[in-house]
Amino acid sequence: SSGINAEYGVESKQVAQQEAARSRFYVEKAEFEKKASIISAEGDAIAAKMLSDAFDKVGDSLIELRKMEAAEEIASNLATSRNVTYLPKNKGMLLNLPSQRWRERTVVY
C-alpha cells in the first residue's frame, strides 16, 4: 500500500512539473509574441514616417505615377480579355441604322 502511494506521489510530482513547464512555455511564448508585435508596430511606424517624408519631398508625383501604373495594368488586363469590346468615343453604339423603329426596339446596356 505504501509502495502504491509512493508511486502515485512520484507520478503526481512529475505531472505537476510537466504542467509547470507547459505553463512557463505559454508565458514565454506570449511574451515573445508581445515583443514581436511591438517590434512590428515600430517598424510600421518608421516606414510610414519614411513614406510621409518622401511624399513631402516629391509632392504628389509618386501618387500620380502609381495611378498611371495601375491604369496601365488594368488596361493590359482588359486588352487581353475576350469579354471586352471597344467602342469609338462620342459615337452611338448603333451607327447608320436605316430606321427609327429599329432604335426604339433596341435596348442598350
Image (tube, rainbow, N blue to C red):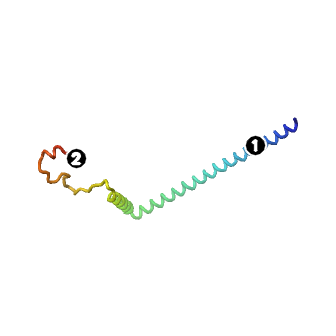
Q: Nearer the viewer, residue 46 or 83?
A: 83
Residue marked by disc 2? 108
* Side of 1 where 72 appears, left or right: left
* Side of 76 where 33 appears, left or right: right
Determine whether the residue tagged by mark 1 lies in a helix, strand or loop: helix
For residue 87, what is the image quadrant?
A: bottom left
Could you tell which of marks 2 and 1 lies nearer the N-terminus?
A: 1
Distance from the alpha carbon under mark 2 to that under mark 1: 76 Å
Who's the residue at 64% across and 50% down the image?
A: 31
Who's the residue at 63% across and 52% down the image?
A: 32
Residue type, label 2: Val
Tell me residue 48's x, y (percent).
Answer: 48, 57
* Side of 12 where 71 appears, left or right: left
Query: Mark 2 or 1, which is nearer the eye?
Result: 2
Tell me residue 83's x, y (percent).
Answer: 31, 53
Which residue appears farthest toward the bottom when viewing the image? Answer: 58
Residue type, label 1: Val
Which residue appears farthest toward the left when viewing the image? Answer: 99
Cβ atoms under marks 2 and 1 closer than 8 Å: no
* Side of 91 where 81 appears, left or right: right
Which residue appears farthest toward the top when viewing the image? Answer: 1
For residue 20, what is the image quadrant?
A: top right
Residue marked by disc 1? 15
